[in-house]
Image (tube, rainbow, N blue to C red):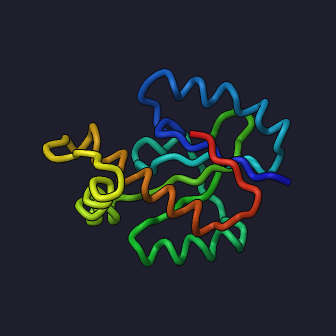
């Protein structure tokens, strides 16, 4: 069975309308993909309160999370507290922000993305988080995975 990972800045983190869009599609995605549908969002402790309930991850996730922890990426596994309670991974990238300049350098070297003078909350924060999410997905190494952002 195919794994589907729904990646959004607004999973358990209401900022604007995308929160509602992601939330509204959960029942349909769960119907189609059952236990193989997992949401991924950023971990912000205050926003996670009332939105997220942490649980023990499956062993294969736990092993990957431990390897990621050594790189400064902390994964919180549990459920988004909406009626369907979908599996959710919230990625705490706060310790990983030390890699910001390397990530920005790589983006310049690989793709000529100019990030000099960018603001932290407008560019740097989402770029660091999305890089951490890419590492999470890579470390999980699940075959037949689809990532929807």
Residue 127: image location, x then y, percent: 36, 49
How many numbered marks does the figure carry? 0
Residue at x 75% of width, y 63% of height: 143
Q: Which of 149 and 38 is in front in this view?
A: 149
Q: Residue furthest left?
A: 117
- On the picture, is 51 further left or further right than 102? right
Residue at x 43% of width, y 66% of height: 73
Quadrant occupied by the C terminus: top right
Residue 11: image location, x then y, percent: 54, 39
- On the picture, is 96 further left or further right than 1? left
24 relative to 130, above or below: above
Residue at x 44% of width, y 24% of height: 16
Quadrant occupied by the N terminus: bottom right
Name the image quarter holding residue 140.
Answer: bottom right
Residue 71: image location, x then y, percent: 41, 74
Q: Nearer the viewer, residue 16 or 137?
A: 137
Residue at x 23% of width, y 45% of height: 114
């Amino acid at each position: 069975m195919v794994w589907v990972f729904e990646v959004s800045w607004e999973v358990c983190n209401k900022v604007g309308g995308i929160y509602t869009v992601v939330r509204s599609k959960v029942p349909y995605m769960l119907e189609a993909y059952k236990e193989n549908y997992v949401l991924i969002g950023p971990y912000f402790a205050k926003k996670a309160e009332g939105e997220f309930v942490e649980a023990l991850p499956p062993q294969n996730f736990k092993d990957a999370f431990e390897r990621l922890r050594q790189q400064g990426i902390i994964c919180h596994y549990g459920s988004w507290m909406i009626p369907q309670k979908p599996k959710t991974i919230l990625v705490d990238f706060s310790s990983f922000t030390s890699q910001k300049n390397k990530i920005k350098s790589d983006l310049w070297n690989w793709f000529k993305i100019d990030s000099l003078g960018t603001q932290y909350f407008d560019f740097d924060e989402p770029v660091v988080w999305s890089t951490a999410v890419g590492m999470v997905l890579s470390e999980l190494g699940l075959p037949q995975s689809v990532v929807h952002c």
